[in-house]
Image (cartoon, grey):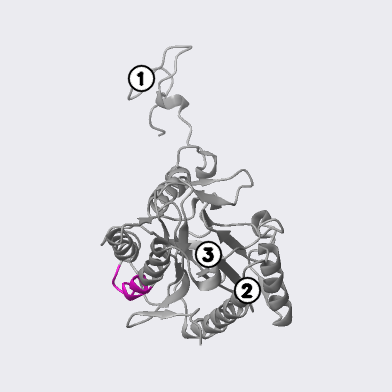
Amino acid sequence: MPSGKGSATKRGRAADKPAISPGKETKDSTKETKPKSQRYFTFERIASLFFPLFLTYNVGRSGFKLYEGYIENYVVPLHEPQDFVDMREAGRMVASALDHVEHFIREGASTYDVDKEVELYAVLKNVTSATLGYKGFPNSCCISVNDVVLHGIPSKTVILKRGDVVKLDIALIVDGWYADSCRTIIVGGATRKATESLVRMTEQALELGVQACGPGKYSGDIGAVMREHLEAGGFSAVTKFGGHGIGRKFHSAPGISNGGTRGSGTFLKEGMFFTIEPIATLGSTEVTTLADGWTTVSADGLVSAQFEHTVGVTASGCEIFTTSL
């Protein structure tokens, strides 16, 4: 007998439960079980709404590139030995491109001229620029001069002069694999002592970040050691931007903070690929993105530096894919 409804077994015989008055229904009599697909507040739907927000908040706090607008992959891929072979080739190509193009960063050259050298290099090597057309970015590399912290758009009107601090960031796609690297070059090789120290210590921060990378460690360990080193030198670590997962995608999880806390963030495992990219300024850690949606400058107008490697977590530590031969 269906529960929740009164009934009679025979004419004139009372039912086991009181009869329902005409025009009235019990609460259970109108209850209808909808198929799961028609229910709004299911566990799956609630999780699908709040889980991405939770991840965006936490990964964003640890320095993930917030301009992305969304995280393209919630799960950090673990790569196989053959993937390491492929990434070595992609990384080698990026390092070679930086070695080649660095010679064109000289007094009197425009950043547009330098970008054209990157474009030509990609054509000659039969590889693809990862930045050209990426979410509307118009050029084959990012070139950020002096107070431009990152994502500088090459321009014919930006003419390099002696003492300029130039961040050259090149990312290429080689047989479907992305590799990304940045180095800071001083035009003419010399500038103010404080700026030279900033550049030197930012490069050292990258080396320390790589040393802090390995299985069983945390992404926060990497950011912490880089930030502490920069602050010890009197510089500020830019924490709004940081490293990112890479491989078959340009940007993915995990985020690698430039200002992390030891023992926090992503637990690192063998087979993970990501970038480590300390960014530092002479002054404030605050940055501002201009109206073009890309160019990001230091809030106080002071000079910045950046270095970056693409790396892979190995059984014993960390392999740099983008080191120069």
Queried whether the magenta region covers residue 99, the answer comes back as no
> What segment is highlighted magenta in the picture?
207-217
Among the two numbered marks 3 and 1 on one chain, the one whose residue lies closer to the N terminus: 1
Residue holding disc 3: 163
Distance in Å between CA atoms under marks 3 and 1: 101 Å
- The circle on residue 258 is none
Classed neighbour count for the residue bearing mark 2: other residues with Cα under 10 Å, few (<14), some (14–19), many (≥20) = many
Judge from the rendering whether residue 313 lies leftward or rightward of residue 168; answer left or right. Answer: left
> Foreground residue, 183 or 72?
183
The answer to whether marks 3 and 1 mark residues whose Cβ atoms lie closer than 8 Å is: no
Amino acid found under the numbered disc labelled 1? Ala
Q: Which residue is depicted at the point 48% across and 12% down?
A: 23
Q: Which percent across, then down, holds residue 128? A: 68, 73
Q: Can residue 109 be seen in this view?
A: yes
Question: Mark 1, mark 2: which one is toward the viewer?
Answer: 2
- Mark 1 vs mark 2, CA separation in Å: 81 Å
Mark 3 Cα shell of 10 Å, populated few (<14), some (14-19), many (≥20): some
Q: Depth-wise, is mark 3 or mark 2 nearer the camera?
A: 3
Mark nearest the camera among 3 and 1 is: 3
Residue 134 point in image, percent of width and height: 65, 59
Q: Quadrant of the N terminus?
A: top left
Q: Where is residue 323 in the image (x, y as percent from the top left)?
A: 48, 81
What amino acid is labelled 3 in the image?
Gly
Residue with the mark numbered 2: 173
The secondary element bearing badge 1 is classed as loop
Position of residue 279 measured from the top left corner of the image (x, y, whole percent): 43, 60
- Secondary element type, mark 3: loop
The residue that disc 1 covers is: 14
